[in-house]
Image (cartoon, rainbow, N blue to C red):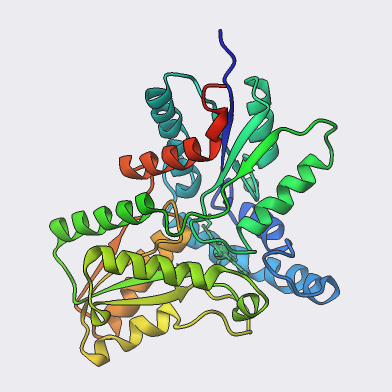
Amino acid sequence: MTKPSYGVLLVNLGTPCKPTPECVRCFLKDFLGDPRVVDLPRWQWKPILHGIILNTRPKRVAKAYQSIWSEQGSPLKVISMAQRDALAAKLKQQTGTDIPVQLGMTYCKPGMAEGLDKLKQAGVDKVVILPLFPQYSCSTTGAVVDGLAKIFAKQRALPEYRLIRDYHLEPSYIDALKTSVESHWAEHGRGQKLLMSFHGVPERYITEGDLYRDHCEATAKALASALGLSAEQWLLCFQSRFGKEPWLQPYTDETLEALPKQGTTKIDIISPAFSVDCLETLEELAIEGKKEFLDAGGESYNFVPCLNDNSDHIEMMAQLVTLNAGNWNGS
Ligand SMILES: C=CC1=C(C)c2cc3[nH]c(cc4nc(cc5[nH]c(cc1n2)c(C)c5CCC(=O)O)C(CCC(=O)O)=C4C)c(C)c3C=C
Ligand SMILES: [Fe+2]
Ligand SMILES: [Fe+2]
């Protein structure tokens, strides 16, 4: 059998293995313990994390996970694995060769080390690494790079690797989002405004150099323009704030509460920063966001799912991978 010329590591954030307070605690300990995510000095953050957050948050968040859990497990992991399989099939169809694709997550299992090991066992020493965060942030893609450095620090030989830092303006990504919104409109009708709700980060990360806000704004403008929306027909907002310092604004929850009072009672909402549906979309937007909007006087609230394993999303990943593999293709 011919050796594959390279492999692909798809990376997503991570998720608890079970929707129980114990597993959520273990996930939050790993995730919120990463200085890329919460960058406060350790002496200040560790007592808050271990003394307060890990004792109070897991019970509440486990309930939220239970409301979205599927028979196969956490949606984030289940859909990411479907993406992995679909991408491997697409690459085989396009290149005629078996290009191994593995999933690795920054936190919890399967980890990036496990994914890289499997690629090594498949015989590849060249890897395209695709973090599934379309917009770069130090708190996501930055954390992936730190995680890789920790793994590589324990190895004598390193694979050759190419990292796709972001794809926030990739035409095939914008096109896939456009198609998804248009088919949603065709099926469910169209609201007065399209809200594009991105995961937030502390505002300070941006003033200190994170590219995230610029990337979100560029994605949002490109999508609005692809859909032919005028300035009054769409809004950019940021969800999931955490802690006391200011995060990127406008906040999604405050926007949802304010819109009906301003005469916007029918909306569609999409979350382009997430490659797969997860707690932040299925619970925070599709369940809680809807309640907030309807309670504030809204009449119609339609959540547009993430691109997940849609064929044009997988096609986009295959394009990004083969482009970045460059001279590895066929080597
Ligand atoms: C505390 C700081 C946080 C930063 C900074 C942050 C950035 C960030 N996160 C995502 C994507 C996801 N976050 C998810 C869950 C989640 N995020 C935070 C906190 C920060 N995120 C917490 C505490 C949680 C867990 C839930 C909770 O306790 O409220 C998820 C979902 C995981 C799942 O299992 O479904 C994703 C995905 C991005 C893209 C981002 C910065 C750009
Ligand atoms: Fe667990
Ligand atoms: Fe998050």
> Which of the two residues, 39 or 223, is positioned nearer the viewer here?
223
Q: Which quadrant is home to the N terminus? A: top right
Q: Residue at the location (67% across, 56% down)? A: 143
Q: In this rendering, is residue 155 above or below 224?
A: above
Q: Can residue 132 be seen in this view?
A: yes
Q: Residue at the location (41% across, 54% down)? A: 170
Q: Position of residue 172 (x, y in %)?
A: 35, 49
Horizontal relation, residue 111 to residue 77: left or right: right
> Which of the two residues, 267 or 46, is positioned nearer the viewer here?
267
Q: Position of residue 280 (x, y in %)?
A: 46, 63
Looking at this view, name the residue that lies furthest to the bottom.
261
Looking at this view, name the residue that lies furthest to the top.
1
Horizontal relation, residue 326 to residue 270: left or right: right
Q: Residue at the location (67% across, 21% down)? A: 121
Quarter-wise, where is residue 299 in the image?
bottom left
Q: In this rendering, is residue 26 above or below 314?
A: below
